Image (spheres, rainbow, N blue to C red):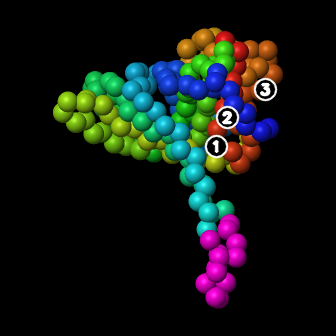
Amino acid sequence: MPITKDKGSIRKFGGGELWYKSVSDDGQTPSGSWATFGYVGESKLSDVTENESIADETGNTVASLEANRVVKFSGLFMQTDKDTIDFLKETVRGNFYLIYHNGGTLNGKTQEIVYGICTIKPQVEVATGTKRIPFEFTVLKNEAAIVYSDKDGTNITQAELPSGNYAQGDITTGANAATIPINQYYSLTETAV
């Protein structure tokens, strides 16, 4: 699909909703219920695939090949309470998470991103004056399609989504629209508000 000019797609603010659920290292087995990260000051998705230049023996570049793909989601948490600090310095170690992010509304649609298998970098940095804790999630490629389902294995209903307000694809109809395809990192959907 070609990109077109669309003023409705210009956005300044995000949706302010960031939630997590524990999962197995293959992303197939969620555990527990959704929990919020609290207030988010800013967030950034970085999905970068480097290109490696290949030169012949004369030193001229004759090819450019895709190299490593690195997907990260980072930003700043606004809360600096004990629970947030303890979670980021200890709880995240050795664990994997399914992450839901409401990216905000544009063109009358809610943009939602679900990251299937994430590790959270254990870190706490609280500077005087700003009092914001940076976060960094590394998103891992899944070896099998990840269908968002609740603990009983059925499709998630709208009420089971983090805030209960978003439709994440056609998941409320019972269809498996909320799926991260095999060998992908995340799904991005835009759902009518």
Q: Give the mark nearer the N terminus: 2 vs 3.
A: 3
The residue to which callout 3 is attached is 176
How far across and how far down the image is residue 140, in percent? 59, 47
Vertical placement of 30 versus 172: above or below?
below
Q: Which residues are magenta?
A: 53-65
Q: Nearer the viewer, mark 1 or mark 3?
A: 1
Q: Quadrant of residue 128?
A: top left
Q: Give the mark nearer the N terminus: 1 vs 3.
A: 3
How far across and how far down the image is residue 175, in percent? 81, 22
Q: Nearer the viewer, mark 2 or mark 3?
A: 2
Q: Report the Cα–Cα distance between label 1 and label 3.
A: 17 Å
Q: Which amino acid lies under the numbered mark 1 shown in the image of this protein?
A: Tyr
Disc sitting over residue 187 in the figure: 2
The residue to which callout 1 is attached is 185
Kindly state the secondary structure of the residue where label 1 is placed.
loop
Packing grade of label 2 (10 A; few <14, some 14-19, many >=20) is some
Q: Which amino acid lies under the numbered mark 2 shown in the image of this protein?
A: Ser
